[in-house]
Amino acid sequence: MKITKEQFKKDFKRRVREKFANEVEESSSDELFASLGSVIQAYYSNAWKDTRKDTRASQCKQAYYFSIEFLPGKMLKSNLLNMGLLDTVRDSLKEMNIDLEELCNVEKDMALGNGGLGRLASCFMDSIASCGLPGNGNGIRYDYGLFKQKFVDGNQVELPDEWLREGNVWEVRKASKAVNVNYGGHVYLKENERGQLKPVYENQQVLRAVPYDTGMLGYHNNMVNTLRLWSAEIPEFEENRYQSIEERRDFRDLTSVLYPDDSNYEGRLMRLVQEYFFVSAGIQSIILSQKKTGVAMLDLANYVAIHINDTHPALCVAEMMRILVDEEDLSWEKAWNVTVKTMSYTNHTIMAEALEKWPVSMLQEVIPRLYQIIEEIDRRFVEEMSLLVDSELVERTRIIKDGQVHMAHLAIIGSHSTNGVAKLHSDLLKGVVLHDFYLLYPERFNNKTNGIAQRRWLQLANEPLANLLDQTIGTSWRKEANDLHLLMNYKDDSKVLQQIADTKYTNKVRLAEYILKTTGIDVSPDAIFDVQIKRLHAYKRQLLNLLHILKLYFELKDNPEADIYPRVFIFGAKAAPSYTYAKHIIKCINEVANMINADEAIQGKLKIVFLENYNVSLAELIIPAADVSEQISLASKEASGTSNMKLMLDGAVTIATLDGANIEIRDIVGDDNIAIFGLTEEEVYRYYETQNYSALKIYENDPVIQRILNAFIDGTIPNIKVEGQEIFDSLIRYNDEYFVLRDFQSYVDAQKSIETLYRDKPRWQKVSLINTAHAGHFSSDYTVQRYAEDIWQIEPIRKVGNDSEQ
Ligand SMILES: *Cc1c(COP(=O)(O)O)cnc(C)c1O
């Protein structure tokens, strides 16, 4: 987009005056941010309108990405970058004595997601638009995002995230596109005058679903897709029906909170209503708009692809059937054909506790008609499959069993594509977890390894490195991430290696300042910055990291002169509020941090920093400053991981188990440029089979481990009487479900190799460069292009980066 500085300044000053009856010089940061956002939105409004117009006019097929979470973070800078206005705006503001960074800090993170799953959805939104693909998001506009985390005496405390308090400059309320979502009550079938069985509803409740649209801008291509988030309101005609305040509040609060659970399933009624709410609103709105352009329902799959991101939107299958059969009068067979062709599904986990299933009674209560439809889908599935395969296989794969509705089964049976999110994960789906379904529908299974938007995680988050790359290899990598490979030409160029190291140092200084300001802990940018940032979960094994820290600490206690390279261990992690064990690990890390940071005997060689409230913005600050990337989940548990990709892109060296996408990172950078350790997935499964793992034996035979674990229960680590005992018991009494002790020695060895490597500065710099040079492979641009070609069958309507600017 071409806007001169003069034009921008004029527009900006006028907007400040119009909005706040104020001059720029007299305005607060809040006012300036609000004005800037609204100017920027006005700049892209034409492109937004044109994108919509062009998709409608060409009647091209569009994808709709249904996700109960989106985690975009802040949008100001990324919008400016994608419009090609970042420098223009930054310079213009500077000439008006305004610091763009300061205005960026005013913006609240849009944190409508827990972690990786929601962040993936947002990287996809960026990449879909940047690749010129017609694809939109569909989700929930939560009034409160993921809770804000504070530490009080080392314990996690959750505070509400009132991200909408000052309004949201990017969203547009589209009241005219509101639809009604019905639920509850009773339903029975009655023959109509044409002899068709149609549902008759009694005592249904009605919610008005109001969409709020946010533009999703492509990088330098004038493409603006739509992220449509639904908010629940009580329709006017229903106002009197809700008797008590509580009753009314109940429903108005439907889209109030995001459930703060990650990798864990919680069967709460309100969550089920949320799921139905955004599914029903989304499908209705898609069908309405297709009908408006004259698309026949039988042809819907040629115009629309609907993606089910994890099982939370799996009701899409049944809702589509309801509309096609009950409202559009299609026969069941035809409707089913259309539905399966339209839907596709991504599985995100193999962890049993995360697999979503709902009691039949809850579905009957909340969505009685949808339950009837699911019963019919299940009945027909059983009938059809019983002719083809043995009855036990059918029993295992059916949707309704043991009084529960299995959402993954519904998603697989009702769609034409099921994908995992990394090679290993997809193989485990086919071979183990969903093997039964693989036998039934082998052609439906495929892999789509996750990816990350290099624009946010390198161009925006790490400008020093991005600018250096421009000078070194040119700017093409900004559009074609694989061109980062050109960096390999400089792997032995000591000048470039040193320049890259300098950018890392700059980023470490910036993070060190933030750490000092927010925690009072003084860390040296000359130390190794060793980073583990992700949700707190037993399978991610932050505990393994902590045990290694304690090992180093005791070594230094025994011998203050021990030759340990100074390290700063940096954590960022939220625990689900109901996940006691994870919260206890937070408490223990914080107490160990206090103990070690305050111990002068170790001469500051070890520092531990647990930063509060890990979110996208904090990730953008930490990742460019990381030397070491901790990806240490138990093999087979992390479906893909994406922070592993972000950290690699910014030049961190990975220490990792052979899990998720770590394997693909290893394959692409080579064994010499990553530190691999721990059990393989086969070895883990062998332990499950033979049942011959004994954590107690390891403990009894290893004095180092004894000393470390005893520190949790003998008062060595202060203030963790309850928490320390629980962690000790999880390892010894309950036999260490995640094989922390089994992997400990090999982790220690890998850490040692990291340290040795770091001491060899030229070698370290080269390894770091090799990681950045190969990270283009994990750009979500390529991931969404594979979705577009293999699954959605959609094509670009804009050229990639057809703007001439960089
Ligand atoms: C990338 C990201 C995640 C995912 O991290 P993993 O290590 O892949 O689990 C979670 N939260 C935020 C804020 C992120 O940016």
Image: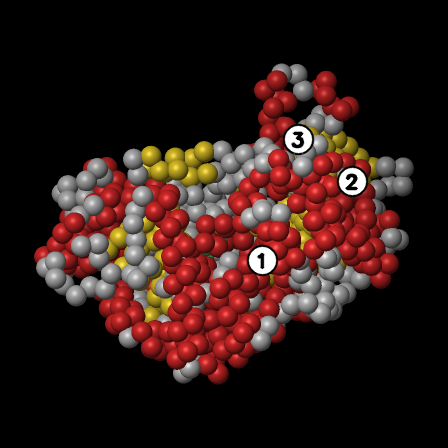
Let me know if residue 506 appears in the view.
yes
Quadrant showing the C terminus: bottom right
Dot 2: what SS?
helix
Let me know if residue 65 appears in the view.
no
Look at label 3 and name its amino acid.
Gly
Please tell me which residue lies in front, 682 or 554.
554
Q: Which residue is mark 2?
A: 177
Q: Which residue is mark 3?
A: 184
Residue beneath the point at 33% across and 37% down? 155
Whether label 2 touches label 3, CB < 8 Å: no
Crowd tier of the residue under label 2, counting other residues whose Cα lies within 10 Å: few below 14, some 14–19, many 20 or above: some
Residue 277, x across and y down, in percent: 66, 39
State which tag comes first along the sequence, 2 or 1: 1
Q: Is residue 420 left or right of residue 332?
A: left
Q: Is residue 100 above or below residue 367?
A: below
Q: Is residue 608 left or right of residue 41?
A: left
Look at label 2 and name its amino acid.
Lys
Please tell me which residue lies in front, 649 or 742.
649
Look at label 1 and name its amino acid.
Cys
Residue 365 falls in image quadrant: top right
Distance from the alpha carbon under mark 2 to that under mark 1 = 26 Å
Please tell me which residue lies in front, 759 or 628.
759
Distance from the alpha carbon under mark 1 to that under mark 3 = 36 Å
